[in-house]
Amino acid sequence: MKLLNQEIDIREFPRSGKTFELVATAEECAEICERLQIRAVDKATARLKIESLGERAGVLVSGDVEGNVTQACVLTLEDVRSDIAEEFAVRFVNEAYAAHNTSDDFDPDEEDIELFTGDIIDISEVVVQYLSLAMDPYPRAENAEESGEIRFSSGSGTDIEGDDVPHPFAALKKLQDKT
């Protein structure tokens, strides 16, 4: 099945669950790339199991997402390719019943909780979100090194001993002292 635009009607799922695989086409990879604002998405797949837990407990979507992405290095802007493999579990609870559930009904260590209204869940959105969460937020090329020194300032506009950089407000500080 295609990966994007996969909405499920929760009324159609058996209580025992249903498993399936979603594979992004080349066009869908380009859409995901644009959405996540990265250089490239070469592959995105998800293997999912969807289980109805009952009207009040919601729907459990679990599985794994895999992908090959290219991001820009945060230091050099070189391409950084990475393979992604992430397992996830998210429980969708209808907003109408969420107020009736107690904290004992959910285990935050087991699954994430999402609220929804109606009978339709966009599982494509879930897959793209977990693909995004699995990406390195600060990708670095292998040869990237921080080249600059960290300089500290007193914040008063005066130079700290050994600080060669003139501070932008130092001239104003001198003018203030003359008045």
Image (cartoon, helix red, strand yellow):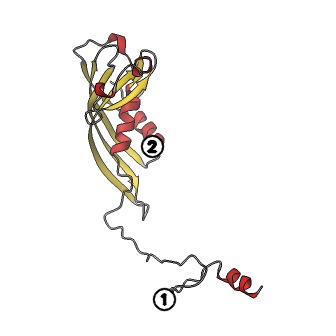
Q: Secondary structure at mark 2?
A: helix
The vertical placement of 127 against 84, above or below, is above
Q: Earlier in the sequence, mark 2 or mark 1?
A: 2
Determine which of the numbered discs, if any, sits on residue 36 in the image. 2
Image position, residue 72 (x, y; %): 42, 56
* Mark 2 → mark 1, Cα distance in angstroms: 43 Å
* 135 or 2, nearer to the observer: 135
Q: Secondary structure at mark 1?
A: loop
For this orientation, the residue located farthest to the left is 16
Q: Which residue is mark 1?
A: 162
The vertical placement of 105 against 139, above or below, is above
Of the residues tagged 2 and 1, which is closer to the observer?
Answer: 1
Q: Amino acid at mark 2?
A: Leu
Residue at left offset 45%, top offset 37% = 31
Q: Quadrant of the C terminus?
A: bottom right
Picture quarter containing residue 62?
A: top left
Determine which of the numbered discs, if any, sits on residue 44 in the image. none
Picture quarter containing residue 42?
A: top left
Residue at left offset 43%, top offset 23% = 116
**Mark 1: few, some, or many residues within 10 Å (few <14, many ≥20)?**
few
**Mark 2: few, some, or many residues within 10 Å (few <14, many ≥20)?**
some
Image position, residue 9 (x, y; %): 38, 15
Image position, residue 113 (x, y; %): 36, 30
The vertical placement of 76 against 100, above or below, is below
Image position, residue 100 (x, y; %): 39, 19
Q: Amino acid at mark 1?
A: Gly
